[in-house]
Image (cartoon, rainbow, N blue to C red):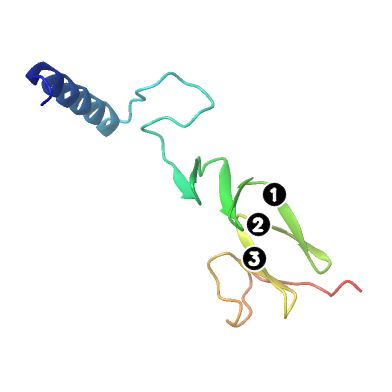
Amino acid sequence: MAPRGCIVAVFAIFCISRLLCSHGAPVAPMTPFLMLCQPHKRCGDKFYDPLQHCCYDDAIVPLARTQTCGNCTFRVCFEQCCPWTFMVKLINQNCDSAQTSDDRLCRSVS
């Protein structure tokens, strides 16, 4: 059985870190590594900062990453290529939905 003092110390550390995080204060020094209180998401088994990266095809990529769709270029974190129509749509739109003003029609590159 763990000594009573250790249990109290662990509980106190937990309570202090919860209090700091509830006010948005970092509990670690500012570094390029993930901090406890900053927003984060998961991509597979890795965490990433959604303000700088996104998860694309099970890989963490920078927000500025682009790829081609026919003769168009699209931003993989914000847009998607619908390959059977060569149309670029926003990431949350269904490729089967009707064309909107946000969509870009691309030509096939032969």
For label 2, the SS is loop
Three-letter residue code for mark 1: Arg
Query: Residue 65's mark?
Result: 1
Q: Is residue 98 left or right of residue 68?
A: left
101 vs 35, left or right, is right
Kindly check if marks 3 and 2 are in contact, taking CB atoms under 8 A apart as contact: yes
Q: Secondary structure at mark 1?
A: loop
Which residue ends up furthest to the right in the rendered image?
A: 110
- Residue situated in front as seen by the camera: 19 or 107: 19
Figure quadrant of the N terminus: top left
Q: Is residue 67 above or below residue 96?
A: above
- Residue type at the position of mark 2: Val
Mark 3, secondary structure of its residue: strand
Say the numbered circle drawn on residue 80: 3
- Mark 2 lies on residue: 76
* Image coordinates for residue 95, horizontal then vertical, percent: 61, 77
Residue 36 in percent (x, y) is at 37, 31
Res. 96 mark: none
The tag earlier along the polypeptide, 2 or 1, is 1
